[in-house]
Image (cartoon, rainbow, N blue to C red):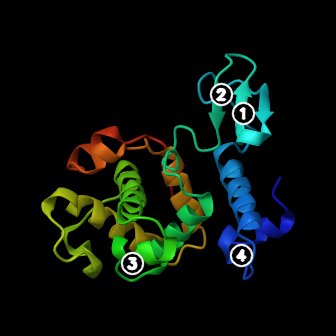
Amino acid sequence: MSTSHDKRLRSPLDDPEWLADLDRTEDRCRHYLEDLRWPEGISCPRCDCHSIGDVPARRRHYCRGCRHHFSLTSGTVFHNSHLPIWKWFLVIELLLGSDAGVPANQLVELLGGSYKTSWFVEHRIRAALVQAGEPAPEAQAGTAYHGAGDKYRSAYRAESSWRARQKRNPDAFRNTVLALLAAEPVPYGELTRSQRSLSSNRRTTPVS
């Protein structure tokens, strides 16, 4: 369960001590994500049953109704990335807080790992914003993405438009996480192809 202190924070990374204990930070980020994904308690993503058991050693759950095993991130943008939730949340904070976006080669220095991983995280977030129906006006292209080809331009513009629209919104971080939870997780292979078709996968749940 989240603590009352957590709920006063805009995001789990608002705590000035978050970097001092990353295990604790990861737990807080997971609680935050769980509260947003399942505000009425954990339910099975396959059958919506609320009779759920836990497998703590594997950080997984199982449904007593249909026997489906799943995790906090199953079926979401955050799944299959091999990154802790706190790193995803850090990328969201950086994308929201920058003036013109953060190139993947800069994220490598902050997240560690490979360029491919940083690129994957950023483009999954952008794909989620496209699916959320974020408009992508021509004038919104960020300066951090000069040289981006037509293949990804709509996704860059959607990110830039989202950032501008959420700039003074105190719930910007929460809204972004909700948009990611609502989106279909796009496999790496599809992300490397044109994202123009992503708009056809938009879900109907609006995010203010």
Whether residue 107 appears in this view of the structure is yes
How far apart are the alpha carbons under marks 3 and 2? 36 Å
Marker disc for residue 106: 3
List the residue tagged with mark 1. Answer: 61
Q: Amino acid at mark 1?
A: His
Q: Marks 3 and 4, Cα distance to the nearest angstrom?
A: 21 Å
Q: Is residue 131 left or right of residue 42?
A: left
Reading the image, the residue beneath label 4 is 18
Residue, x 38% and y 57% (percent of image)?
Answer: 120
Alpha-carbon neighbours of circle 2 within 10 Å: few (<14), some, or many (≥20)?
some
Closer-to-camera residue (12/21):
21
- Asked where in the image residue 154 lies, by quadrant, the reply is bottom left
- Label located before the other in sequence (3 or 4): 4
- Name the residue at 30% across, 60% down: 135
Q: CA distance from mark 2 to mark 1?
A: 6 Å
User: Could you tell me the amino acid type at mark 3?
Assistant: Gln
What residue did someone put label 2 on? 69
Rendering coords of residue 62 (x, y %): 71, 27
What amino acid is at disc 2? His
Q: In the image, residue 93 lies at what x, y percent? A: 53, 72
> SS at mark 4?
loop
